[in-house]
Image (spheres, helix red, strand yellow):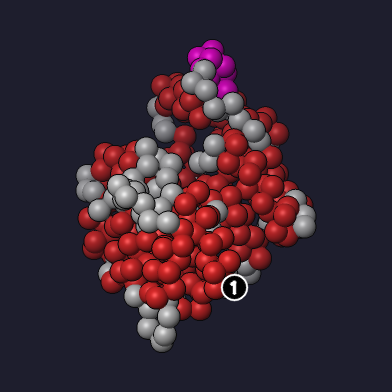
Amino acid sequence: MATIKLPEQLPSPAQDSETLRKALDGFMHDGKAVIKVLCHRNATQRKLIRKTYQELYNQDLIDTLQSKISHNFGKAVVWWTYDPSERDARMVKNVLSSKEIGTKEQLQVIVEISCASSPHHLLAVRKSYCSLYHCSLEEDIIAYAPPFAIKILVALVSSFRYDGEVVDLNLANEEASTLQEAVALKRFDQDHVVWILSTRNVFQLKATFEAYYEKFGNHLSEVIKAATDGWGTDEDSLSRVIVSRAEVDLMKVRKAYLDIYKTSLDQLIKDETSGDYGAFLMALLGN
């Protein structure tokens, strides 16, 4: 369930473009005006605003935002303004072009986009990637990702998972045992493991993980975490989650965060951010 709130009376794209033009004109920008417009428009409306802004002022709104707003607020508002599939394609490209591509913090971006997206959105991301960079996402993963991650990443981004709530409990038990064998050998790149993780729908995987816990007494995620380094957190990760889920299921993310950490995501953002950046994230949370 989305968290962004739209106005009852929606201004025209031309009016929004004029408001943004005034907010971004001159040496200083008006962050509150930018937030008031962009944080309260859905993806379709933002796309139309960007098109209208280009027609009216012969400037790309993204370029203007990048030139006028910097640091965490600037990066977050640019991500939000992009069409969702273009945004995710660019995020992946940034990761694959990074000198730190071997770190788990970088690889997590690709895993999030491939695993937390609907199959149709992931397909749109792959199409955007081809259009922007004139090659497939899979090609660049093979070319730039570290060898240990190539097999699983290619499988994840290539998958078109069934997203219905269909679960086979017998299969869940069988595949829980298969995963346990991989855990014992510390070989998570085996073909059958890659096949399970990249093709099963989220409901089937959840059943498999629950079967793993019932059979072996440990949560699979904890076992894997004991064999790997932590992901780490930073402002980019926080922005990425809020921006990418605000129109999808951020309400569920907020509830899950509260259940796990016994504090609200809203409180985390209030404690860890400030200024226009914090106000921007809070607006996307529906405040």
Q: Position of residue 166 (x, y in %)?
A: 52, 18
Q: Which residue appears at 53% of the width and 58% of the height?
A: 82
Q: Which residue appears at 50% of the width and 14% of the height?
A: 169
Where is 207 relative to 73, above or below?
Answer: above
The residue furthest top is 170
79 or 64, which lies in front?
A: 64
Q: Which residue appears at 63% of the width and 44% of the height?
A: 124
State whether residue 47 appears in this view.
yes
Q: Position of residue 160 (x, y in %)?
A: 64, 33
Say which quarter of the image contains residue 281.
Answer: bottom left
Say which quarter of the image contains residue 175.
Answer: top right
Q: Residues within 10 Å of mark 1 (few under 14, many from 20)?
A: few
Residue 258 located left or right of residue 213: left
Q: Which residue appears at 42% of the width and 33% of the height?
A: 219
Three-letter code for the amino acid on which mark 1 is drawn: Asn
Q: Which quadrant of the figure contains the N terminus?
A: top left
For disc 1, the marked residue is 58
239 or 169, which lies in front?
A: 239
Under circle 1, the secondary element is loop
Where is 189 relative to 57, above or below?
Answer: above
Q: Position of residue 268 (x, y in %)?
A: 26, 57
Extent of the magenta region: 167-177
Residue 71 located left or right of residue 147: left
Q: Position of residue 210 (x, y in %)?
A: 43, 25
State whether residue 188 appears in this view.
no
